[in-house]
Image (tube, rainbow, N blue to C red):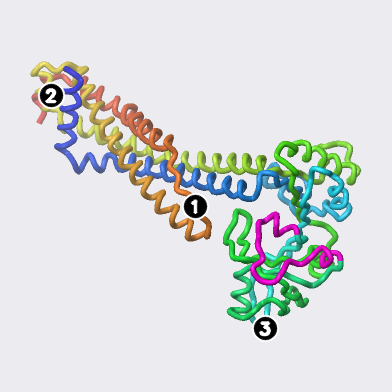
C-alpha cells in the first residue's frame, strides 16, 4: 500500500475515536509542556545572570575568604576570617588591580524615630559606588577621609529613604544602626534590583566604622577590585594569588585560605549550575513521557482488540501484515506528534507567562527565551515515543489471522 494511503487510513482511524485520541496523548502533552517550560525558564535564568555579570563589568575580580567550596560541606569557608587590612594594603601594590573595595556585611535593621527598615547594610569605601554603578541623587558620598577617621556617616538607598523619611529630607538627619547614630550624607538614585542585591535597599557605611563599632571584627567578608584591562585579567589573578600567599605564608597552593573569582569564571559556574538543574528537572518531567508512552501502548492494544473485525476485513481485501503494522504505527506516531505540537505551544505560552510573573516577583527583567532546541526536542521525543511504544500493538495487529478476525464478535 502506498505510504500516503497508510497515513490517510491512520488519520481516519484517529478521527473515528477523537475522545480516546485526546486522552491517549494527554501524558505526552504534559511531558513535552514540562520539558519546554523548564528549558525556557532555565535559558531565561542563564540570560538574566549573564546579563547582570556583563553589567557588573567583565574586569571585576573578587577575592573570597576561606577555601573554595567544592561541595555543601565546604560552605563553612564562607565565614573565614582570612582577609585582613594587611592583605588590602598588599593588594594595593599590584599595578593592574585597581578600584579595590573591601566589604563587610552588617546584619540587622536601621531605624529613625520609630520607623524601622531591614535592608542591606554594607561596610565599604567610597569606591563601592563606582563598582556597583550607583549615583548619588541627594547629598554626597562619604570620603576617604571619613573612612580613615572611622566617621559615623551613611549613604542610603531610595527605598530606605522613602521608608524612614517619606517625603522629608534625609540628608543631615541621624539614623540608628545597632544603637549607634549615623548621619545621612547622601541618598542613592533609584536603580532597582541587580543580580547581587536590591541597590535601593542599600545602607552604605565606611568599612572601618562598621568593623570597629558595629561588628567588632578585624577581617573582611570580601574584597572586590578591577583589572586595568581585560587583557591583563589572568596576569592580575596570578599576582593576587602570589601576593596573598606571601602575606599568609602559604607555600602550597592546595592550602590557600582564599580564592579568586573572575566574572568569566563566575558566569561559567552559574551556567554549569543552571544547566545541571535544568537537566535534573527535565529528567523528572521525562517520567511523564514514559508514562504517556505506556498509556499509548495500552490504548493501542485496546484499539487493536476493538478493531479486530476491521483488521480481518482489510486483510481479506488484500492488505498485508506490513500494511496493517504500518497503519497502527502511523496512528501512534501521529498521536504523539500531535501531542508534541500541543505541548510545545502550551510550554511556550506558559514560559511567556512565567517570564512576566518572575519579572514582577523579583523586580528584574526576566527575559523570555525559548531555545530552538526545545521545540525540536519536543517533536523528536514525541515522535520517538510514538514509534517505540507503537511497535508492539502494531505487531499484534499484523499477526491476527484474517479468518479468525472476521469471526470475532
Q: Tell me the SS state at disc 3.
A: loop
Tell me how many marks there are.
3
The image quadrant where one finds the N terminus is top left
- Disc sitting over residue 338 in the figure: none
What residue span does the magenta drawing correspond to?
Answer: 127-148
Residue on which disc 2 sits: 405
Secondary structure category for the residue under label 2: helix
Q: Is residue 285 above or below residue 205?
A: above
Residue at point 69% right, 67% down?
203
Q: Position of residue 121 (x, y in %)?
A: 70, 66
Classify residue 97 by image quadrant: top right
**Residue labelled with disc 1:** 366
Residue at numbered disc 3: 113
Residue 302 lies left or right of residue 251; in this view the side is left
Residues at circles 2 and 1 in contact by the CB criterion of under 8 Å: no
Q: Residues within 10 Å of mark 1 (few under 14, many from 20)?
A: many
Q: Secondary structure at mark 1?
A: loop
Of residues 236 and 212, which is closer to you in this image?
Answer: 236
Query: Which mark's residue is nearer the viewer, 2 or 3?
Result: 3
Amino acid at each position: 500500500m502506498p505510504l500516503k494511503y497508510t497515513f490517510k487510513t491512520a488519520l481516519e482511524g484517529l478521527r473515528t475515536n477523537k475522545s480516546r485520541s485526546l486522552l491517549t496523548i494527554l501524558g505526552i502533552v504534559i511531558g513535552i509542556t514540562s520539558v519546554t517550560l523548564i528549558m525556557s525558564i532555565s535559558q531565561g535564568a542563564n540570560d538574566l545572570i549573564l546579563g547582570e555579570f556583563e553589567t557588573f563589568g567583565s574586569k571585576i575580580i573578587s577575592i573570597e575568604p576561606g577555601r573554595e567550596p567544592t561541595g555543601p560541606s565546604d560552605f563553612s569557608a564562607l565565614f573565614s576570617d582570612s582577609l585582613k587590612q594587611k592583605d588590602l594594603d598588599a593588594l594595593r601594590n599590584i599595578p593592574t588591580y585597581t578600584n579595590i573595595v573591601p566589604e563587610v556585611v552588617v546584619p540587622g535593621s536601621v531605624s529613625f524615630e520609630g520607623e524601622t527598615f531591614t535592608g542591606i547594610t554594607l561596610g565599604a569605601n567610597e569606591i563601592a559606588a563606582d563598582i556597583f554603578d550607583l549615583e548619588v541623587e541627594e547629598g554626597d558620598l562619604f570620603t576617604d577621609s571619613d573612612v580613615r577617621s572611622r566617621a559615623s556617616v551613611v549613604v542610603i538607598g531610595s527605598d530606605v529613604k522613602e521608608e524612614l523619611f517619606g517625603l522629608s529630607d534625609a540628608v543631615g538627619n541621624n539614623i540608628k544602626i545597632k544603637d549607634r547614630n549615623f548621619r545621612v550624607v547622601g541618598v542613592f538614585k533609584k536603580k532597582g534590583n541587580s543580580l547581587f542585591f536590591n541597590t535601593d535597599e542599600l545602607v552604605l557605611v565606611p568599612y572601618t566604622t562598621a568593623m570597629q563599632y558595629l561588628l567588632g571584627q578585624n577581617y573582611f567578608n570580601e574584597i572586590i577590585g578591577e583589572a586595568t584591562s581585560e587583557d591583563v585579567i589572568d596576569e592580575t589573578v596570578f599576582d593576587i594569588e602570589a601576593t596573598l600567599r606571601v602575606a599568609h605564608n602559604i607555600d602550597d597552593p592546595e592550602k590557600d585560605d582564599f580564592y579568586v573569582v573572575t566574572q568569566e569564571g563566575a558566569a561559567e559556574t552559574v551556567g554549569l549550575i543552571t544547566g545541571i538543574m535544568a537537566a535534573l528537572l527535565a529528567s523528572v518531567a521525562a517520567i511523564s513521557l514514559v508514562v504517556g508512552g505506556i498509556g499509548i501502548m495500552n490504548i493501542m492494544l485496546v484499539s487493536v482488540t476493538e478493531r479486530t473485525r476491521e483488521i480481518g476485513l482489510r486483510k481479506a481485501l488484500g492488505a498485508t501484515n506490513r500494511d496493517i503494522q504500518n497503519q497502527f504505527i502511523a496512528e501512534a506516531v501521529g498521536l504523539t506528534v500531535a501531542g508534541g505540537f500541543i505541548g510545545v505551544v502550551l510550554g511556550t505560552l506558559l514560559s511567556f507567562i512565567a517570564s512576566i510573573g518572575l519579572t514582577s516577583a523579583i523586580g528584574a527583567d526576566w527575559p523570555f527565551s525559548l531555545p530552538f532546541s526545545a521545540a525540536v526536542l519536543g517533536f523528536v521525543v514525541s515522535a520517538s515515543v510514538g514509534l517505540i511504544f507503537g511497535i508492539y500493538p502494531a505487531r499484534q495487529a499484523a499477526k491476527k489471522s484474517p479468518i479468525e478476525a472476521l469471526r470475532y464478535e
